[in-house]
Image (spheres, helix red, strand yellow):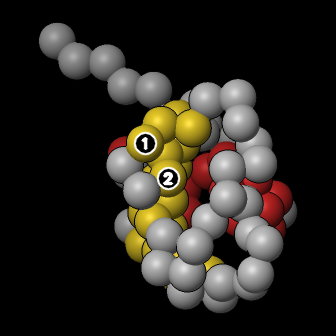
Amino acid sequence: MITVLFFGPVADRVGERQIDVPFREGMCWQDVRDELTPRYPEAFALVSIAAVNGERVRDDVRTPLADGAEIVFMSRFSGG
């Protein structure tokens, strides 16, 4: 199972902070994003930061996943 966490406004638009996605051999993080984007288009319109197992994913959309991996999706944030 892949654990998917959402933070901030992304979580608000998904309506949950965590969901599980069944693991399939050969999965990469982009496969999970591609699967969830049509289900939550308003949320993924805000996503600008993704991380796999605590490591930020930048340009490598083929980052492989193992069973039990954790993916985080969040938007940019600012503070003051």
Q: Is residue 11 visible?
A: no
Spatial distance from mark 2 to mark 1, Cα to Cα? 5 Å
Decide which of 40, 63 is in the foreground and name it: 63
- Tell me the element at label 1: strand
Q: Is residue 10 above or below residue 5?
A: above
Q: Position of residue 27 (x, y in %)?
A: 75, 69
Q: Is residue 18 visible?
A: yes
Residue 45 relative to residue 50: left or right: right
Q: Position of residue 12 (x, y in %)?
A: 44, 56
Kind of residue at disc 2: Val
Q: Position of residue 76 (x, y in %)?
A: 45, 26
Q: Quadrant of the N terminus?
A: bottom right
How many numbered callouts?
A: 2
Residue 31 relative to residue 59: left or right: right
Name which residue lies at 49% across and 70% down: 69
Tags 2 and 1 in contact by the CB under 8 Å rule? yes
Q: Position of residue 71 (x, y in %)?
A: 50, 59
Name which residue lies at 39% across and 67% down: 17
The answer to which quarter of the image holds residue 48 is top right
Q: Is residue 25 above or below residue 80?
A: below
The answer to which quarter of the image holds residue 6 is bottom left
Residue 79 relative to residue 67: left or right: left
Q: Which residue is mark 2?
A: 52
Q: Is residue 25 above or below residue 65?
A: below
Per the rendering, the mark at residue 43 is none
Q: Which residue is mark 1?
A: 55
Q: Quadrant of the C terminus?
A: top left
Decide which of 50, 23 is in the foreground and name it: 23
